[in-house]
Amino acid sequence: MKFIKFYQIIAILLLASGCTKKFLDLSPLSNANVNNFYKTQADINDAVLAAYAMQKGMYIDNLAALAQLDEVRSDNTQDDNRVDLFTNDTGAEWWYWAWDQCYRCIYACNVVIQKAPKVTMDATLQNQYIAEAKFLRALAYFELVKNYGGVPIVTTPPTDLSASAVDISRNSVTEVYALIVADLSFAAQNLPATYTASAEIGRATSGSANGMLGKVYLQEGDAADAKTALTAVVSSGLYSLMPTYAAVFDINNRNSVESVFELQFTKNTDASPLESYFASNVAPLPGGGYYYNHPTTDFVNTFEPGDPRKTVSLTTDQNGNWYCIKFNDPTMTSFANSGHNFPILRYADVLLLLAEADGESPAAYALINQVRARANLSPLSPTIPSTFADTLLHERRVELGFENQRWHDLLRFGVAIQVMDAQLASQAVTLNQNNLLDPISQTTLAANPKLTQNPGY
């Protein structure tokens, strides 16, 4: 994504001019800077790029904290015992880091949404910039509501650092989802379907917004509206599956026809650390690896014989330990310096989500079998000795492993406790409803006295 090559500089300029205080750790701009800076179309574009930078930080900063919440808590991977064993530890840094990064992104988005309407500029481009910010804000709130439940809704940048401005109570889950749906609906109506300039490839599109809207509706349990949004992506004709699974994760195929929205990275100037984070600590990589978010034995064994997705996703080190190679950059020459993009939404995910929205039906199996055919696996039908939900969950698991999907799939299908109790039986760990939400960190609670902790913590 060439348009984000100034990402980090813009983000630093945006955030360095302020100071930090209280529950969101928003690093707000001073009033003078906000009022004097956003005067031109170029200024607003810079602010949009800063929002993209903050959104990307949600997934890679602080040792990729969201991977802990979205993947490590599932039966796919393991790492930090406080997370994957559901330890009641509200002091764990992952809870604070994930919350903080999401609200940093929300702040950057709110700057765009507030300032863009006040700048004289092309009306279509103005709506696009606002739509991009609302799309990114929706993604941040979606992560927050899935992991923490109801959270404070903030839709404008704070104008000062007084307690009345930054000490904010939690909104309900329903209210948060209403904002997410409104933001994504606006984005779907005001974002372009494609970008013609190569320098802008990677910006959010109407397909990105509709695809995420479908996922949001499903997470809420609204299959009918999810089907409408997801069908819009499929019927656009702009997306298709890559011919092989290996091609999807070939670094030379970034922003392919299967990409609905992905995080953009450039080696040396704006690199991804994920390959180094996920690799084994004895893997033959520059600087080795951190070996976190590594696969469980159950995940390794869940692939069908001959499924190429296993060899694309996993390998073993010299000690026989399995680790993730899905996001490897074969040209990487230094630690945490990969140019591999990270998928937020792929067309294969859209097809499987649409199958879920359809419910058990010939149409749903046809969608699942599109994904399986790419893996050279035999088609499935209602005659197989498994429920439709089990079939779909399995297909999502092997197709989307390490892409931060599994934990919330388990929640959406209502089987998280059942699956994790079986996974953790040897550890004598059993879950209850309270474990389905993450705790709010003690750091966050101490900074904002209006916040309340989730039940059970």
Image (cartoon, rainbow, N blue to C red):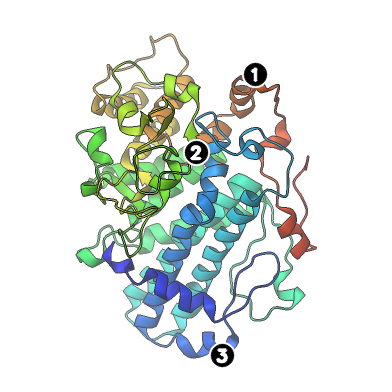
Q: Using a 10 Å C-alpha cutoff, classify the residue at mark 1 as few (fewer than 14 neighbours), some (14 to 19) or many (20 or more).
A: few
- Residue type highlighted by circle 1: Ser
In the picture, which quadrant includes the C terminus?
Answer: top right
Secondary element type, mark 1 = helix
Q: Nearer the viewer, mark 3 or mark 2?
A: 2
> Along the line of sight, which residue is nearer the eye, 5 or 337?
337
Quarter of the image holding residue 403? Answer: top left
Secondary element type, mark 2 = loop
Note whether 28 is above or below 83 in the view shown.
below
The residue at the point 32 percent across, 15 percent down is 305
Q: CA distance from mark 3 to mark 2?
A: 43 Å
Q: CA distance from mark 1 to mark 3?
A: 58 Å
Residue 327 visible to the viewer: yes
The residue at the point 63 percent across, 39 percent down is 83
Quarter of the image holding residue 242? Answer: top left
> Along the line of sight, which residue is nearer the eye, 27 or 269?
269
- Residue 293: give its label: 2
On screen, residue 189 versus residue 291, left or right, reads left
Q: Residue 197 appears at what percent x and percent y? A: 20, 66
- Residue type highlighted by circle 2: Asn
On screen, residue 58 versus residue 175, left or right, reads left
Mark closer to the chain start, 2 or 1: 2
- Residue 32: give its label: 3
Q: Using a 10 Å C-alpha cutoff, classify the residue at mark 3 as few (fewer than 14 neighbours), some (14 to 19) or many (20 or more).
A: few
- According to the image, label 1 marks what residue? 426
Quarter of the image holding residue 240? Answer: top left
Q: Using a 10 Å C-alpha cutoff, classify the residue at mark 2 as few (fewer than 14 neighbours), some (14 to 19) or many (20 or more).
A: many
Mark closer to the chain start, 1 or 3: 3
- Residue type highlighted by circle 3: Ala
Note whether 107 is above or below 152 in the view shown.
below
Q: Residue 140 appears at what percent x and percent y? A: 53, 56
